[in-house]
Structure formats: C-alpha cells, structure tokens
Image (cartoon, rainbow, N blue to C red):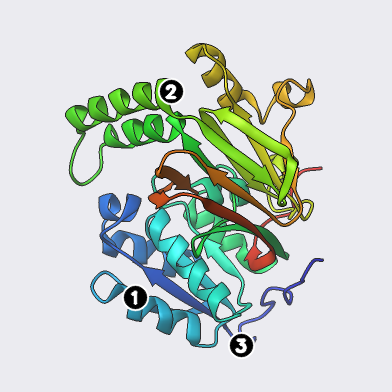
Amino acid sequence: MRYRTSTPPSSETTALKTLSLVLNAHSGTTRELGREKVLEAVHGSADWAKVIVHDCSETFKERVSKACAEPSDYIAVAGGDGTAAAVLNELVRTNCRTPVIPLPLGTANLLPKRLYGARSIETILREAPEYPVEPLHAGEVDGHLFFCALMAGFPVRFGQAREALRPDGEGRQPGRALTYLRKAMQAFGQTRMRLKVDEDETMKLRRANALMTLPGGAAAMIHGARPGEEVLEHVFTHTEDLSDALGALTGFLGEMLNMGELNPLRSQECAVLDGPSKITVMLDGEVLTLKTPIRISLRPNAALFAAPEPDA
C-alpha cells in the first residue's frame, strides 16, 4: 500500500506544511556538526515548511513524546540511531501515522541509507515534499523495533569495534576497539544460538554463531523504501572458518543470496532465539543485551516514511 502526499507548494500563497524536527545535539554526527549548523541546514533546505524544533538533548523522553503527539505533516529526526529508534517506537506505540524522515546523522545510519542512499540531509529535505509516503514492516524484540536488521553473534562485536574507531566527540578509542575484537573472537568460537521459526519444531536452526533477521526480507533491503513481503527472513552462519562466516554475513545482500548459498529461514509471525543466558543484539545499529529466550515478532506496516521511489 502506498500513501501519496499532496503536491509541493507551487506559489508563495500556498500554506506551509509543518515539519516537526526531533533534535538530539549530543548524539551521532549531530554532535560533530554542532546544533547550530544542523538547524541552519534544516531551515535552509526545508523552506516549504514551518519547522518546529523539539530539542531533546536534556529531557529526552518527554521531548520525543511531545514531538510525536503534536500534529504535523512530517517528523524529521536529527540525532543518532538511538534517537531515531526512540521516535519510531513512540510513534508505533501511540499508533501515530505521521510520515517520518530519518536524517543520516547517526553512526550506522542503516535506515537512512536504505531509504535515501547517499543523499545529504539538505537534498533529502529539499526533495521531501515530492516523496511518496510508504509503510515499512518492522521486527520487534522486547518492545524495541527494527526496520532494517537484527544482528546477533560475533558480527555485533565487530560492529562495536568499528564504531569505537570513529572520530566522534570522544575521539577514536583503539583500546575499546581491541576489547570488542577480543569479544568477537570469543563469540565466534563459543556462541551457539538456536532459532525456532513460527513455533514449528521442524523449522529449527541449531548452533549458529551469527544471525541476521530482516523484516520484509533481503530483497526489500536491496530495493530501499519498498516494504517487501510480510515475513521475517533469517540469514545465519554456523561455519567453523572465520573468513567464510564473515564473507557470508557481508555478502548475503549481493550475489551470494542469489546463488542460494545461504538458504535463509522465513517466519510469517515470529521466531524465538535461544542459546546462552544472555545474547547481545544490534537493532538498526543500536546494541542491546537481552535475556534468552528472545522472541522476534513481525509488525507489518509498522510506520510510514517519506522516501523517494525505490529503484526497480
């Protein structure tokens, strides 16, 4: 199902739309650029809208709730991956259907990259009134939503090591990166996860050391703003060779999936992840440590997004 916005303003007399901007100046790339520079870019690019700024740098939860509750034509998110996740969780919790524009100001930026590719925040905001509005499926774990991917196992630790080397407000942290790399090697050799699909004992994965779950399937991720099928697709590895496992996890969106080498499992409603007493997962770039068993549920058409037409 596709939702169309009205056409962009054609004259100076056309009423401005309302853009609620959730700003967290202490997270993601927003911290590096600075609050004033981000606001300048937003106001300069979204001249088609009245911009209402909700600065959630201090009273985070209250400001996010207020931004989601106030009527507006769009909600743009300027902050880290966690800020975007908080806004989306609140919108879904309150059944608000305001289209979201997640700006690429986080660290992982999985969702903005999926929706907008390499577009800058200025380009996204200039083009936003022309974008169709599309719903996306989400996965849900312990009350937390993800629209791109859940990762579990040793790749999560490699992701944390990479983020520790980013030149953010705290500077590069090679010591922390080495700690995560050691944890990644331990997880590769020791983590053995199990996955049961749709309560079906015959559809069970054993002894995986890496898992990636995608709402809508891998094809939806490749094609951007399309919601994809109403499924959770589970890509996994349980190889004994580290290079093979890394190749599988990084290559599944490309030729390897088309070649059928990974043979992902699919669930129509939910899957249950089990293994150690606690498992560290990454949801669209945000890291959580959860007690097992972990129930992964599908939330069809969970939220609306303003995004360009995906490539065919």
Tell me residue 233's x, y (percent).
70, 43
Distance from label 1 to label 3 (Cα)? Answer: 31 Å
Which of these two is toward me, 113 or 61?
A: 61
Mark 1 / mark 3, whichever is N-terminal: 3
- Residue extending furthest toward the front: 201
At horizontal 52% and vertical 35% (from top left) the residue drawn is 193
Q: Nearer the viewer, mark 1 or mark 3?
A: 1
Q: Residues within 10 Å of mark 3 (few under 14, many from 20)?
A: few
Q: How far is the residue under mark 3 from the one under mark 2?
A: 57 Å
Q: Are marks 1 and 2 in contact (CB under 8 Å)?
A: no
Label 1 to label 2: alpha-carbon separation:
36 Å
Q: Which quarter of the rendering shows the C terminus?
A: top right
Q: Amino acid at mark 2?
A: Phe
Using the rendered view, name the quadrant where residue 163 is placed: top left
The secondary structure type at the circle numbered 3 is: loop
Residue at 48% in and 57% down:
103
Q: Residues within 10 Å of mark 1 (few under 14, many from 20)?
A: some
Q: Position of residue 154 (x, y in %)?
A: 43, 29
* Location of mark 3 (residue): 15
Is residue 308 found left or right of 155 in the rendered image? right
Mark 1 or mark 2, whichever is nearer to me:
2
Q: The residue under label 1 is which amino acid type? A: Lys
Disc number lying in front (3 or 2): 2
Residue 152, percent from left and from top: 49, 38
Mark 1: secondary structure = helix
Q: Which residue is mark 2?
A: 188
Of callouts 3 and 2, the N-terminal one:
3
- Which residue corresponds to mark 1? 61
Q: Residue at x 32, y 55 (%)?
A: 30
